[in-house]
Image: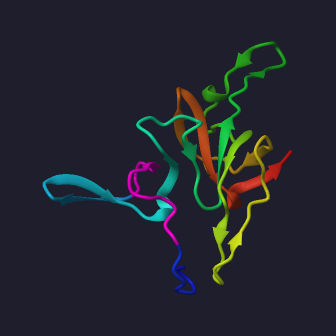
Amino acid sequence: HQESGLLFPMPVVAGEGVVYGKYDGTEIDYESGKHTLIQDTDILVKFTGDELTLESADVCSDNVLVKVDASEEETASGLVIAATAKKGSKPSTGQVVKVGPGRMASNGEIMTVDIAVDDYVKFRDFAGNEVQISGEEYAVVRMTDILAKF
């Protein structure tokens, strides 16, 4: 643990696939191949098997996987505006589909997440990291970035 020095197990094991942020990690050459070194906190989603699917996906630490609500908005005159067409914003609400085990406290105990699968959440604008799973848009959001559940 970065504050107490306690050792804790890595959230992934050899052979699991991971999805990490676009700008995370350091690329190195090792044994004639390109590899990327990442921290455990850089992992957005881990999965087993050859393909990332909702069934094979899992989140780490205090992250939650949210099915993004890309609903449309209708103006007073009846025009329909897609959520993706709004300038300077991206969807920040959705339904929770996966919940991580929680964050480790400095004393080594896991602080569980107060969010459950099927909860609807509102999170900070631009806080979620976008992940495509089976052609659908999801966001990986840290518990500290969730503003409300309903």
In-front residue for pair 101/123: 101
Q: Residue at x 75, y 44 (%)?
A: 117
Total of numbered circles in the picture? 0
Give the colour scheme of this rendering.
rainbow
Query: Vertically, is 9 above or below 13?
Result: below
- Secondary structure mostly seen in the magenta stretch: loop
Residue 65 image point, x, y percent: 64, 45
Camera-side residue of 11 and 75: 11
Q: Residue 12 lies in magenta, yes or no?
A: yes
Left or right position of 15 against 130: left
Taking 62 as reference, is 73 left or right?
A: right
Q: Is residue 49 above or below residue 76?
A: below
Residue at 53% across / 28% down in the picture? Answer: 134
Q: Residue furthest top?
A: 78
On whether residue 95 falls in the magenta region, the answer is no
Q: Give left or right: position of 52 versus 14.
A: right
| Residue for point 47% across, 44% down | 48
Q: Position of residue 146 (x, y in %)?
A: 73, 54
The region drawn magenta spans 9-24
